């Protein structure tokens, strides 16, 4: 007997609510609760690699949403399919966390716990200062990123 479709797909949103643009993952997660079926869990993680692995446990597919360091255009969305793409090495400017997604992916691969499909939506941020609000250009992307993630989840549910 196979697991229900929703159980096989999950969303992990990373971020910190009070660190400027690092809140984007949490804001997208809140918007997703209105867009996704109830059987698709949306987890909020704050950069704990072990918690992420726990949330990925027994999933066929996981979509991660996270802020990334500025690469030129705050609010720009990057989509990575980690079955074919790789995350740049830690410290190369793709994460706003000292430890987090890159480490969770590396650990999951080492332990052979990586979901078959692991998709990352990374939104370029500009400000990650403690106590800061998200910048307007990043906050303006919440609905469009949430819709993109919801479409991704719908496709994954049909294909796995």
Image: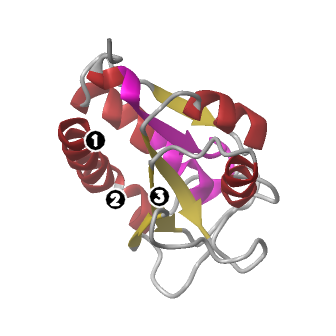
* Most foreground residue, 131 or 89: 89
What label sits on residue 20 in the rendered view?
A: none
Which image quadrant: the C terminus?
top left
x and y percentages locating residue 106 in the rendered image:
72, 58
- Residue under label 3, please give it: 120
- Residue under label 2, please give it: 140
- The answer to if 66 sits in the magenta stretch is no
Q: Is residue 66 above or below residue 49?
A: below
Q: Mark 2 packing: few (<14 Cα in 10 Å), some, or many (20+)? A: few
The answer to which of marks 2 and 3 sits earlier in the sequence is 3
Res. 48 in view: no
x and y percentages locating residue 77 in the rendered image:
38, 69
Point out the frontmost of discs 2 and 1: 1
- Residue under label 1, please give it: 153
Q: Specify start and end residues of the magenta stretch as a single range.
A: 7-27
Separation of marks 2 and 3 at Cα, in angstroms: 19 Å
* Most foreground residue, 147 or 39: 39
Residue sitting farthest toward the top:
1
């Amino acid at each position: 007997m196979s697991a229900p479709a929703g159980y096989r797909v999950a969303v992990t949103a990373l971020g910190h609510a009070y660190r400027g643009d690092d809140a984007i993952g949490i804001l997208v997660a809140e918007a997703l609760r209105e867009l996704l079926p109830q059987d698709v869990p949306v987890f909020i993680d704050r950069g704990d690699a072990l918690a992420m692995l726990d949330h990925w446990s027994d999933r066929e597919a996981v979509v991660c949403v996270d802020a990334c360091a500025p690469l030129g255009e705050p609010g720009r969305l990057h989509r990575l399919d980690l079955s074919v793409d790789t995350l740049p090495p830690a410290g190369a400017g793709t994460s706003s966390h000292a430890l987090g997604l890159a480490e969770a992916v590396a650990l999951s691969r080492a332990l052979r716990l990586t979901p078959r499909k692991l998709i990352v939506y990374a939104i370029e941020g500009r400000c990650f200062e403690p106590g800061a609000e998200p910048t307007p250009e990043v906050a303006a992307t919440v609905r469009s990123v949430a819709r993109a993630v919801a479409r991704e989840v719908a496709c994954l549910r049909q294909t796995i």
